[in-house]
Image (cartoon, rainbow, N blue to C red):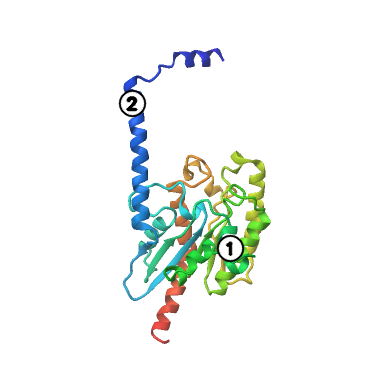
Amino acid sequence: MEGTMEKSENRVPPTIVESTLNSVYALFRYYYDFIIIFLNVLFLKGNPTIVNRGPIFNNKIVIIGDDIAAGVGDIDALLHIKGIASPLALQLRKNTRIKQTWRIYSCGVVGSTSEEWLPTSEKKNDKTTHFETVFNNPKYADAKIVIIFLGFNDERNGSLSADDTYENIVAISKVLTNMGKPVYICPVPTHADHLVSDELYGNNLRRNELLDLYTDNETRPLIFKGPQIHGLNYEYKGDFLYAPDAQHFSPRGYVKIAKDFEDLLENHMVRIEFKQFKEKLNI
C-alpha cells in the first residue's frame, strides 16, 4: 500500500506542452473521426461490397440486425464498410468456386432490438419498422441470402426477455422464408456479458440455446445456423477478437466471422449460381 502511494506521489504531472499536445491530438482525433464517418455515410450508405464476376448475374446478400450487423467496434477508415461485409467480400473474391457477381449489403442499425426489426405484419400496430425500410426497398428486396444478427441489445437497450428475442427472430425469419429467402441466424455474442451483469449472461445463454434449437430443426429447409460467435465457442474466446469495450467485435473479430461465414456460405452460393445458370439456359 505504501509503495503504491509512494509511486502515486512520485508521478510527474504532464508539462504544459504535453497537456497542450494531448488536447490538440484529442481535438484532431474527434474531427478526423467525424469527417471519416460523414464521408462514409455520404458515399457508402446503401452501397455494397462487391465480388465482381461480370455483369450477367447479380446476386445479393443482405445483412440485417443490431450493433454486430452494423460493425460497431470495427475501424473507421475512409470508404470502408464496417462489419463483416468488407472482409466477407474479400474472402469470396479469392474463392475460385464463386463464378457470379455477388453484392453484399450491410443494413445493420446501431442500438436496435429484435422488436424494432419485426415486420409490420407481426406487430400490433402498422408503424414501419427497420424490416420494411430494408425489404420494401428494391435495392434489397431481391436478396438471395439474408444474414441476421439480433439479440445483442434486447436487454441492454430494452426489456425483452430471452423468449421475446427468440419469438421475434422466429417471426422475422418466417416472413423472410415465406418470401423464398434463405436465412442465416447468428447467436448473441456473450464474451463480456458478465461485465454488465450475471443476469444478462444467463439470459443470453438462454437466447442462444433457443436459437440453436430453432436452427437445428431439419424441417426448416431455408433456416441455417450462422457462425457460433458466442463465448462458449473456444474460437471466440480470444480478447484480440473484441473491441476495447470487450463486448463488440474488433476488426480482427469481424474478419474471423467473415472467414467462418465463407465456409458456411460457399456451397450454398454455388447451388444458387448453378440454379440461375440452368434457368438462364432453360435447362
Q: Looking at the image, is 76 positioned above or below residue 8?
A: below
Q: Position of residue 240 (x, y in %)?
A: 47, 42
Which residue occupies the foreground of this view, 45 or 279? 45
Q: Position of residue 73 (x, y in %)?
A: 46, 46
Residue furthest bottom as drawn: 282
Q: Residue at x 67, y 47 (%)?
A: 202
Q: Which numbered circle lies on residue 118?
A: 1
Q: Residue at x 52, y 54 (%)?
A: 66
Disc 1 marks a residue whose amino acid type is: Leu
Q: Position of residue 91 (x, y in %)?
A: 39, 59
For label 1, the SS is loop
Disc 2 marks a residue whose amino acid type is: Thr
Q: Residue at x 48, y 65 (%)?
A: 134
Decide if residue 280 is in sight here.
yes
Q: Looking at the image, is 214 positioned above or below residue 83?
A: below
Dot 2 and dot 1 residues touching (CB under 8 Å): no
